[in-house]
Image (tube, helix red, strand yellow):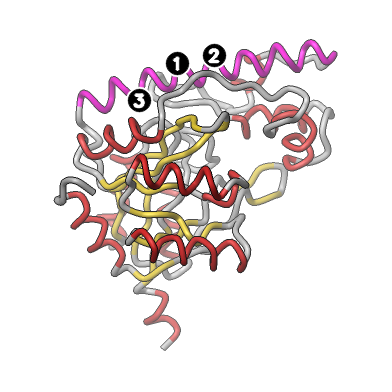
């Protein structure tokens, strides 16, 4: 009976090495099947480069792959992420817009490296990219986890979490941010690409008034209630918020793979929800004025 239940569930937030994950898209699909999931979303940061491979792997392995993206935005002075589900990953306008976002991400990364160097840390972007063990493709992106990994490898931090807490998290010594688009713009982009926008991991922003404001202004179709960094209290708050605004409730592990022996943020399938949510997301893609 438990196997039947698991096969009706999905994880709607995972990353691949197309952005700051460790695995290929095909490996994420394999892990999802091993954990008994029926569906998996690929939601890399500001890129859809991993979707095609994941779709092919899902078709071969009998697992539903939801094409997605996680768009970087800014509101209230902090980074806000918006997930887009069922976007047309071949849409030329979307691809051009995501390319611009990756350029912003590159400028942010360069500033972080400069800040680290000013702190006396011997690190270069070349060393960060070298840690990939392969060439970086033009449509892939580098994120803070890559920089954190380099800091651990070079002995400047004990763990990935230590690297973030000391240097990379908001308010930490080397944190940097660049001007970004608003959540409203991201939601519009996602809809224009045929998708359904969902506000990602609201608990990470530690500002529920900001979250409420984003929902009111950007009008996402859904909210990620169940996330690896949400506890029961956060889940209850955002479930109530979803009910208040009539939002689709989603769940995602935010899986990035294993770095320095640690899973970041959570393992595939550690946060999951009924596959029935996919029908609601697809319906949202067909509905205007959400």
How far is disc 2 from disc 1 in space, using C-alphas?
Answer: 6 Å
Is 221 placed above or below 72 here? Answer: below
Image: magenta residue range? 92-120
Please tell me whether mark 3 sits on a helix, a strand or a loop.
helix
Left or right: 188, with 101 as reference point: left
Is 100 placed above or below 201 here? Answer: above
Q: Is residue 149 visible?
A: no
Q: Residue at x 83, y 28 (%)?
A: 156
Please tell me whether mark 2 sits on a helix, a strand or a loop.
helix
Quarter holding the N terminus is bottom left
Q: Residue at x 59, y 44 (%)?
A: 205
Q: Is residue 115 magenta?
A: yes
Q: Is residue 7 visible?
A: yes
Q: CB of mark 2 within 8 Å of CB of mark 1?
A: yes
Is 130 placed above or below 89 here? Answer: above
Residue 103's disc is 1
Query: Where is mark 2, residue-wise?
Result: 107
Is 88 placed above or below 62 here? Answer: above
Residue 98's disc is 3
Q: Residue at x 44, y 21 (%)?
A: 102
Q: Residue at x 50, y 37 (%)?
A: 80
Label 3 Cα crowd, 10 Å radius (few <14 / some 14-19 / many 20+): many
Q: Quadrant of residue 120?
A: top right
Q: CB of mark 3 within 8 Å of CB of mark 1?
A: no
């Amino acid at each position: 009976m438990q196997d039947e239940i698991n096969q009706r569930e999905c994880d709607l937030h995972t990353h691949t090495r197309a952005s700051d994950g460790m695995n290929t898209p095909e490996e994420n699909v394999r892990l999802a099947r091993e954990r008994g999931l029926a569906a998996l979303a690929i939601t890399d940061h500001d890129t859809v480069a991993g979707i095609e491979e994941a779709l092919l792997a899902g078709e071969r392995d009998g697992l539903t792959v939801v094409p997605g993206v996680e768009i970087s935005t800014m509101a209230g002075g902090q980074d806000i992420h918006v997930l887009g589900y069922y976007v047309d990953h071949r849409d030329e306008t979307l691809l051009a817009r995501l390319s611009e976002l990756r350029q912003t991400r590159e400028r942010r990364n360069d500033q972080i490296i400069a800040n680290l160097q000013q702190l006396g840390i011997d690190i270069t972007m070349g060393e960060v990219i070298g840690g990939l063990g392969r060439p970086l493709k033009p449509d892939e992106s580098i994120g803070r986890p890559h920089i954190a990994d380099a800091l651990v490898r070079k002995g400047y931090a004990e763990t990935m979490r230590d690297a973030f807490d000391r240097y990379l998290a908001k308010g930490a010594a080397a944190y940097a941010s660049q001007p970004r688009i608003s959540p409203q713009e991201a939601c519009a982009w996602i809809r224009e690409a045929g998708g359904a926008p969902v506000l990602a991991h609201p608990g990470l922003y530690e500002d529920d008034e900001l979250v409420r404001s984003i929902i009111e202004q950007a009008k996402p179709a859904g909210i990620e209630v169940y996330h690896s960094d949400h506890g029961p209290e956060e889940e209850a708050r955002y479930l109530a918020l979803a009910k208040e605004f009539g939002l689709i409730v989603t769940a995602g592990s935010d899986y990035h793979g294993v770095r320095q022996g640690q899973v970041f943020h959570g393992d595939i399938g550690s946060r999951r929800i009924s596959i029935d949510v996919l029908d609601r997301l697809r319906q949202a893609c067909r509905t205007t004025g959400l």
